[in-house]
Amino acid sequence: MKISVYIFIIAYLVSSVFGILYTSVFGGNYISLAAEKVYFTKVLFFGCLYFNIFIHRVYNLKKFIVHFLITLLLSIAAYYSHNNSLLLLWFMLLAMYGLSLHKVSKYVLAVTSAMLLIITTFTAMGYGPDILFERTGSFYFHRHSFGFIEPNIFSAYLLQICMALVCIRWKDFSAKDNIFIFLIWCIVTFFANSRTTSLLLIILLLLVNFSKFWFKTYALNFNYFVSKLMVILCPLSSFVIAKLYGMSFPFALWLDELSSYRFRNICYSLTTHPITLFGGDFHIFHEMNIMGNLYGALLLKDGIIMLLLFLTGYALVIRKAYKSKCIPILIIITLTLLQAMSERYALIPYINFSLLSFSVLLNNEAFLKE
């Protein structure tokens, strides 16, 4: 591997370690280290970008102009939204070079599994609290967070582990892998009680087994169709259901209660905050209103253009994955787009590694190769 690849891997792993740590109950003890990490990884990512421009020479004039214009749009959005996370993600993607989905999945699986093991072990030993959340209704649950700030984040990491495993084991996927994912589903369902992740793990098992064993001949076309559909259906249904909730449609009210008031929060936010091209000073946590839906959060905080860029990026990756016959990334993108309807984690690369697939549209043509 080229030196820029090693530098990127170090930067991504360091960023992931501190990012995962920061979503745990131990995060508050590492504020100064986290600040150093942010500066350190920025330097490394920009170092990789320097290599791509001047050493690997991945740019021609047309590509440079397109990337410059997107950088300009992201900078404008960052100015109006007072949030530079999308801009930093963009530079990280530009810095990525020479890494395939298989290699990325190995690093993701290793760092996420190691951090979860460390954090849950320290929590079990009493060094940190297992924060309990109550869920009432037809059944009463104590939802365990296992050392993280909330059960949904813990479950999101478990989902990422399962998705990375699918990408790594795709050619040799077997009953043992099914059993492992089923055991993870049991933890998510009966201990963390994260309904979205529980449903996504079932969909993951269905899509993988459909593609590998049941209807292998139709797997590529089927997953291509489903992933393309999700790019349109997930954001569209989010806003339509929120609108219907505001009109008190019974079905929308039922879906809202089932989703822990995600659609109510979109409806409220859309009526109290303006929709602009480049976003504004919108707070994800506002009074009792928490914007869990990523599409709503992107629209209001970062603007129409950023939402369209996000969806267009995934649509283009889906097209490239279809041409490369890369079924695993089609499945992962489908799950990510569904997850974004109830969780805002899809813009965090150490929780959603499918974001790294955007690099295949930029400088990392190796991403979809074996």
Image (cartoon, grey):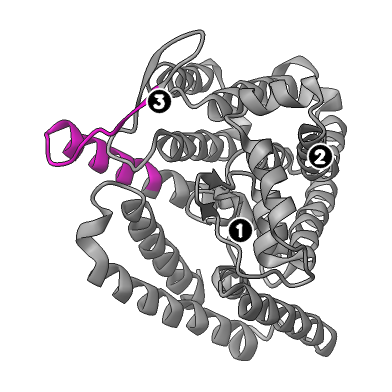
Query: Which residue is denoted by mark 1 in the rendering?
Result: 356
Residue drawn at (74%, 85%), measured in percent from left and top? 68
Q: Residue 291 location, x and y as percent?
A: 59, 47
Judging depth in this view, the residue of 229 and 63 nearest the camera is 229
Whether residue 99 is visible to the viewer of this picture, yes or no, is yes
Q: Which type of secondary structure does the marked residue at label 3 adopt?
A: helix
Sequence-wise, which precedes: disc 2 or disc 1?
2
Q: Is 331 on the left-hand or right-hand side of 121?
A: right
Looking at the rendered structure, the kind of residue marked 2 is Lys
On residue 21, the disc is none
Q: Is residue 59 above or below residue 201?
A: below
Part of the protein shown in magenta: 112-134
Verify CB contact (< 8 Å) between mark 3 and mark 2. Answer: no
Which amino acid type corresponds to the residue marked 3 in the rendered image? Ala
- Comparing 182 with 236, the one in front is 236
Residue 123 magenta-highlighted: yes
Residue named by callout 2: 243
Viewer-closest of 109 and 337: 337
- Name the side, left or right, on which 148 lies relative to 93: left
Q: Which mark is residue 192?
A: 3
Please state the horizontal and vertical placement of residue 343, each as a whole percent of the image. Answer: 58, 42
Q: Does the magenta stretch include residue 266?
A: no
Q: Distance between the residues labelled 3 and 2?
A: 31 Å
- Say whether marks 3 and 1 touch (CB < 8 Å): no
Q: Is residue 369 visible?
A: no
Give the mark, 3 or 1, whose residue is nearer the N terminus: 3
Q: Nearer the viewer, residue 278 or 324?
A: 278
Q: Of the residues tagged 3 and 1, which is closer to the observer? A: 3
How would you rate the neighbour count of disc 3 (Cα within 10 Å): few for under 14, some for 14-19, many for 20 or more? many
Circle nearer the viewer, 3 or 2: 2
Q: Quick check: 74 above or below 139?
A: below
